[in-house]
Amino acid sequence: MEIVKAADTYRTTGSKQAAQCAVNQTLTLAQEHALAGKMSSNQAYYVQGWVAGAVAIAYLKVRETGTATPQQSETIAAWLQSIGQQTIAYYGEHKKSGHGDSQNNHLYWAGVELAAIGVAANNPKDFAWAIDAYNTGVDKIQPDGTLPQEMARGSRALHYHLYALAPLVLLAEFGEANHMDLYARANGAIHRLVNTSVAGIQDPAPFATATNVPQEVPKTISGDQIGWAPPYATRFPNPALERLIQAAPSLSVYYLGGLPPRI
């Protein structure tokens, strides 16, 4: 996504031209009300949230430059909030009906979307919704560090544990930027999830035993599996995790490039 690439370029090089590019593209999306139409399927809502969250985080990476005028910032914030409201309504209805995506990794990724939107638009209610999504996920972590909904994925159980871990770490980082120790939630349950997931990359046998099927294990570790790892390892040194990070150098700009602005 060009917006994300431009924002990362600014974070790594300080290029004001790159920051301006990211703002211009975000403003164009906002003015055209992109992604804000009626979604046709569950998958459409997921993609809407992933893209909106990525754009909101990219915008946060460059907002400090003051490149956007106050009016442009208001336009962007209003657009992002309109998408966020669709996400909140979608998961609210699915929670009432007992749909699985209101309890698994999809909810956590929606939390990242709403956290970024909440900060970008200075909307405490959106941010609070995101924290509730985080709490829902972390409270499900079992004593052995697994997530029941993701363990039910059969041969992709390990994959989905790593996939669910990414938004939970990002949400914990949003918490840190807002003086909230989300890593301590449920007696630090997220650390059990990290340890179990990292151990699963090194030896997937426990996941295979628990699911009764061999696990799909990537031949090469990349940001798809451990994009969450750099900020986590910075706060909580972990030799096994640090070795995985060193084996995946493409992670250098995978994270926000700095803590999210406080809400």
Image: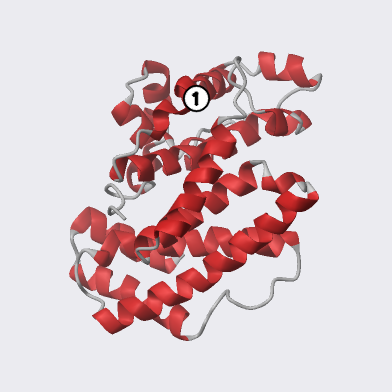
Q: Is residue 72 left or right of residue 94?
A: left
- The answer to which of 258 and 107 lies nearer the viewer is 107
At x 39%, y 72%, the residue is 77
Provide the secondary structure element on which disc 1 rests.
Answer: helix
- The answer to which of 221 and 132 lies nearer the viewer is 132
Is residue 247 in view from this perspective? no
Count of marks, rendered view: 1
x%, y% of residue 62?
27, 64
Q: Is residue 218 left or right of residue 186?
A: right
The residue carrying pointer 1 sits among few (fewer than 14), some (14 to 19) or many (20 or more) residues within 10 Å by Cα, namely few
x%, y% of residue 110?
56, 53
- The answer to which of 195 and 182 lies nearer the viewer is 182
Q: Is residue 12 above or below residue 185?
A: below
Is residue 164 in view from this perspective? yes
The C terminus, quarter of image: bottom left
x%, y% of residue 13?
20, 57
Q: Is residue 196 above or below residue 1?
A: above
Color scheme of the displayed model? secondary structure
Q: Badge 1 is on which residue?
A: 186
At x 75%, y 33%, the residue is 153
x%, y% of residue 71?
29, 83
- The answer to which of 85 and 253 lies nearer the viewer is 85
Amino acid marked by disc 1: Ala
Q: Is residue 34 above or below residue 136?
A: below
At x 51%, y 22%, the residue is 198
Q: Quadrant of residue 104?
A: top right
At x 33%, y 23%, the residue is 236
Q: Is residue 34 above or below residue 117?
A: below
